[in-house]
Amino acid sequence: MAEAFHRRRAAMRALMALLYAAAGIAHLVVTDPFLLIVPDWVPAPRLVVQVTGLCEIAGAAALLIPRWRRLAGTMLALYAVAVFPANLKHAVEGIAVPGLPTGWWYHGPRLALQPVLVWWALFCAGVTDWPFRRRP
């Protein structure tokens, strides 16, 4: 049972690392669409989008290194909280971003799943076992 738990966690960690690496590369290669949803109060939006891309790539890589895993998961969880204002702006203002769907059928689940993304990063990093931990 414990072995299956660790295999599932490792698979979830690999998937999260892959997704964050891809998102980070997208932030660096295709910066302009991300600029559309950056809140107006964020200074130097282009630089911020590029730095967040680097953070996503670094977090993805560090998530796969046991020594850095807990820090990486914690930082990726905080990152998911930090980008929530951009996701909220995207939804509330109905900003059309090329390649992404519009409408609340897309934005609603995306916003609702943001806490799941926070949990996923923490779980993958071994910061939490909730809700799978065994009770004594």
Image (cartoon, grey):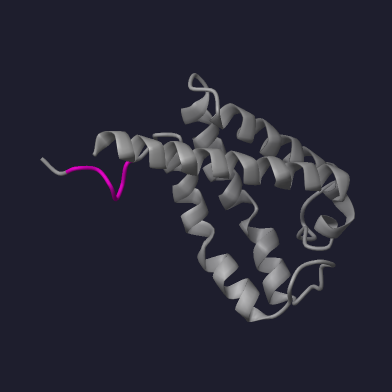
The residue shown at (50%, 39%) is 13
Regarding residue 49, the answer to whether it shows in the image is: no
Q: Closer to the camera, 50 or 109?
A: 109
* Bounds of the magenta segment: 129-134
Please state the horizontal and vertical placement of residue 107, each as a whole percent of the image. 63, 72
Q: In screen coordinates, is 59 left or right of 39?
A: left
Coordinates of residue 85 in the picture (x, y in percent): 65, 60
Left or right: where does residue 52 sit relative to residue 71?
A: right
| Residue 113 shows in the view | yes
Task: Give the position of the C terminus as an image quadrant.
Answer: top left
Q: Residue furthest left?
A: 136
Tell me if residue 103 comes above or below residue 130 in the rendering: below
Q: Nearer the viewer, residue 130 or 4?
A: 4
Give the farthest residue toward the top.
67
Q: Is residue 55 left or right of residue 122?
A: right
Residue 65 against residue 78 in the figure, above or below: above
- Quadrant of the rendered image containing residue 94: bottom right
Q: Position of residue 78 (x, y in %)?
A: 55, 43
Residue at the image position 56 percent from the left and 44 percent from the top = 15
Does the stretch in magenta take in 82? no
Question: In the rendered view, would you say 42 is above or below 5?
Answer: below
Number of numbered discs present? 0
Q: Main secondary structure of the magenta part?
A: loop
Quarter of the image for residue 109 reads bottom right
Residue shown at 35% from the left, 40% from the top: 128
Residue 42 in percent (x, y) is at 77, 52
Asked if residue 133 is among those painted magenta in the image, a careful observer would answer yes
Q: Is residue 84 above or below residue 118?
A: below
Question: Residue, x 82% and y 48% (percent of image)?
Answer: 43
